[in-house]
């Protein structure tokens, strides 16, 4: 199985309004609620690709209960849009906490299609809760083919936490993918994760360079074994010990970019555990990312778009660095 | 006791962000949750004024449970900011429903203090649930000194509902105050409520006139026995069978206007059941409204500001209409 870690899970709420006008009152025309947090989205895409996944992290309070109920409903249904392919199972190994799982509100402006995001900070995790998580994490690593460490840290969790979780995975011989930002990313990279998946903004924040190739190479020197830099609608750049590749979708797809990065992570991870070569992994990540843009919510992708794009992603090898 | 009806109760959530910028992602710095819906706010102010109140309407689902828990906590505490005065009790007579009580999100922009409001539409109320409410309402009217009918109608509740509830109150000999907008207000007025409390926008929508005095007189002709028109920071105008009065606060108070109207309703209602003359009722409503602007949330008011302002509200009688 593939393990995904989401320390700051969220109940993702989407509101549609005809037009968002600050400092006025809006009647929300449509409300949707989904289990969220990057690692949960990654798990849903992995399951759709046929991989059994286990999700861990924290859930608590009223929103934590709703999140787990909705996750169970997704898991139990065994089918989704276009899900004729075999699907993997999602197992809930979230650790219960006394605090209340955060909500995120995405306000979709019907006049532009743009989303305004409001993210609650998340609950305080106590020391005993953290110990319980670590014990479970170490146990789950024994069965894991790979682990993804995803998203922000909740308040009170030390900034070096991802570095610690990466070292635990190294000790268990499990490859790691890290998808976070800021100081937790910087500290995590120093612990030598197998893959990091920053976007251009995160890379620039980390390295000070706005040139993705230069920044990705710098990130490898800082410790990451492979750097998969997402370039939004322009595809992805990957710098590894075996080479450097760039992948582009055949066309730009309009839609909702929320969750595109999580689909890319699922593509990279599934490629890693299936031991497909880097150029094919990259093509899969870019096709999934583009297909996610065509789906209504994070954690979902348009299977027909994915199938159509997969063979049409242009992957080019970059000459070796000087 | 005073009965308040809130058919579309809400869990009121307040988010603080440093600055609201549409189409970007925000970390919420502070989250607060309170039981909401106009009638619940009115009840909290009435209780602070020493009146026992009963709240009815609907509550259901996860948010309904949170709302009732928080309402019970408020009721049980028996004290609030500055609440040295005797306090009334709040009794929860909300009718449980299968649907889920809506949330409202108020996003406070820290750079301006302005609030952007996102209101969910609310749950569908089934016919058996509506029957259960009506039976309870008719029973509660027997003990009520007055009834306030507050706020929007949830989806599926007929637009003529407030008119029906006003007729039931007439039959029980209980005076009514109606605080709603749009077609439910128009239909309700035709059932001859004792008081309506529209703001200038609602009056204009109802009558087509932007002159509050003219619009209020027109609203009386349409059926309302008294019209208390709230004029925001400029105070209030009341047109009754006994005369027309205008009340102004001694100064404009900066703050959060959410809930000022609900405090004004509580002032009018408490004055009605205490049989204080109209000019004093009006002064009370305007002082409470201004004191609510100085409180952090709807349903609360600054007692010191209220005590200071009450004797200083300027009430002038308007010459009789031609």
Image (spheres, coloured by chain):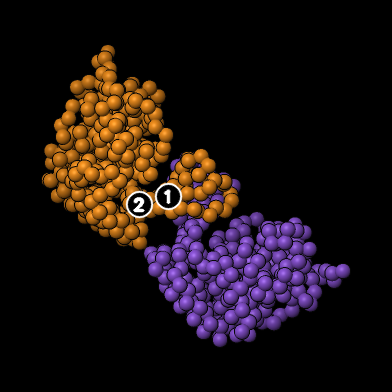
Chain colours: A orange, B purple
The numbered disc on residue B290 is none
| Labels 1 and 2 share a subunit | yes
User: Who's the residue at 54% across and 73% down the image?
Assistant: B5
The answer to whether any part of residue A164 appears in the image is: no
Q: Position of residue B118 (x, y in %)?
A: 51, 54
In 3D space, how far apart are the residues under numbered discs 1 and 2 (Cα atoms)? 8 Å
**Residue situated furthest right in the rendering:** B322
Residue A14: mark in rendering = 1
In-image side of A90 versus A203 (left or right): left
Q: How crowded is mark 1: few (under 14 residues within 10 Å), some or many (20 or more)?
A: many
What x and y, as percent, mark residue A153? Answer: 33, 46
Q: Quadrant of the C terminus of chain B?
A: bottom right
Q: Position of residue B145 (x, y in %)?
A: 61, 83
Viewer-closest of A48 and A4: A48
| Residue contact between numbered discs 1 and 2, judged by CB atoms under 8 Å | yes
Q: Which residue is drawn at 47% across and 62% down?
A: B122
Task: Kindly indicate the quadrant of the structure image that contains residue B211.
Answer: bottom right
Q: Residue at x 39, y 37 (%)?
A: A257
Q: Is residue B193 visible?
A: yes
The location of residue B295, given as percent across then percent down, is 58, 62
Look at the numbered disc 1 and give the secondary structure of its residue: strand
Q: Measured along the vertical axis of the image, is residue A141 above or below residue B271?
A: above
Residue at 82% from the left image edge and 70% from the top image edge: B317
In the shown orientation, is residue A9 left or right of residue B264?
Answer: left
Question: What subunit carries mark 1?
Answer: A
Q: Name the residue under label 2.
A: A34
Chain letter behind tag 2: A
With respect to residue A243, does B56 lie above or below? below
């Amino acid at each position: 199985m593939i393990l995904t870690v989401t320390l700051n899970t969220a109940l993702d709420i989407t509101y549609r309004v005809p037009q968002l006008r600050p400092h006025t009152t809006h009647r929300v025309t449509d409300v949707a609620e989904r289990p969220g947090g990057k690692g949960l989205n990654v798990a849903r895409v992995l399951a759709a690709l046929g991989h059994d996944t286990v999700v861990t992290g924290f859930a608590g309070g009223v929103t934590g209960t709703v999140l787990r109920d909705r996750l169970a409903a997704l898991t139990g249904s065994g089918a989704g849009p276009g899900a004729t392919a075999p699907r993997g199972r999602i197992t809930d190994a979230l650790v219960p906490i006394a605090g209340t799982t955060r909500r995120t509100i995405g306000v979709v402006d019907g006049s532009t299609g743009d989303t305004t995001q409001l993210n609650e900070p998340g609950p305080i995790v106590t020391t005993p809760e953290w110990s319980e998580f670590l014990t479970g994490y170490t146990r789950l690593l024994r069965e894991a083919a790979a682990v993804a460490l995803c998203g922000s840290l909740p308040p009170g969790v030390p900034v070096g936490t991802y570095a610690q979780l990466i070292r635990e995975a190294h000790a268990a011989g499990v490859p790691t993918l890290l998808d976070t930002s800021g100081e937790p990313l910087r500290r995590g990279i120093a612990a030598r994760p197998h893959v990091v998946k920053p976007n251009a903004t995160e890379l620039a924040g980390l390295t000070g360079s706005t040139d993705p190739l230069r920044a990705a190479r710098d990130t490898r020197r800082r410790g990451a074994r492979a750097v998969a830099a997402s370039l939004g609608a322009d595809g992805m750049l990957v710098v590894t010990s075996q080479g450097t590749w760039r992948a582009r979708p055949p066309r730009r797809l309009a839609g909702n970019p929320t969750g595109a990065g999580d689909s890319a992570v699922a593509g990279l991870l599934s490629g890693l555990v299936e031991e497909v070569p880097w150029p094919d992994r990259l093509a899969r990540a870019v096709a999934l990312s583009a297909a996610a843009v065509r789906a209504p919510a994070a954690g979902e992708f348009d299977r027909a778009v994915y199938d159509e794009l997969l063979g049409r992603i242009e992957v080019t090898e970059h000459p070796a660095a000087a």
